[in-house]
Amino acid sequence: MGLIFARATNATFTIFLSFVLSYIMLISMGILWPEGLDWLVQRAKDFEALILRPDIPVRYKVWMDLLIEEGAILLLFFTLIARIIVALVGTAISAPFKKH
């Protein structure tokens, strides 16, 4: 039971850390390199337009219109980068302590 709780806690912590780190990266990019953030926002809009095609049935399109927007796509992008960073740092830290 203790091992299951430890793994669940570790997963929750990494998800929370990735979420916070993604917002930090998003805000930092907006402050330090607004042109780059504007470029990413435009690519997110292009991706949204690609996904929300007019030939999609209304039953699905209404949910996609509500749930998919450029802000969510952009945050997802930064969250994926943050998850990769957290995984690489976590692996680098835990590798020396791993028992063979």
Image (spheres, rainbow, N blue to C red):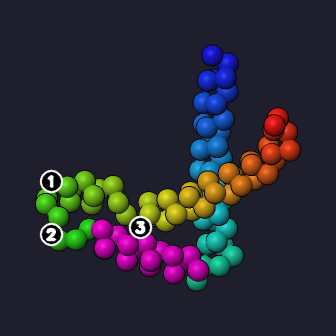
Q: Is residue 61 visible?
A: yes
Return the residue at label 2. Answer: 55
Element under disc 2: loop
Q: How far apart in space, not on screen, are marks 3 and 2 (Cα)?
A: 20 Å
Q: Nearer the viewer, residue 33 or 2?
A: 2
Instruction: Judge whether residue 27 is colored magenta.
Output: no
Splitting the image into 4 quarters, where does residue 5 fall?
top right
Element under disc 1: helix
Residue 7 image offset from top left, x and y in percent: 64, 31
Q: Is residue 86 above or below residue 69?
A: above
Question: How many neighbours does mark 1 have within 10 angstroms: few (below 14), some (14-19), or many (20 or more)?
Answer: few
Question: How many neighbours does mark 3 have within 10 angstroms: few (below 14), some (14-19), or many (20 or more)?
Answer: some
The circle drawn on residue 59 is 1
Instruction: Judge whether residue 39 is colored magenta.
Output: yes
Task: Check disc 2 and give the amino acid type.
Answer: Asp
Q: Main secondary structure of the magenta part?
A: helix
The circle drawn on residue 94 is none
Return the residue at label 3. Answer: 70
Q: Is residue 40 above or below residue 96?
A: below
Task: Check disc 1 and give the amino acid type.
Answer: Arg
> Over which residues does the magenta segment extend?
36-51
Q: Is residue 45 above or below residue 72?
A: below
CB contact under 8 Å: marks 2 and 1: no
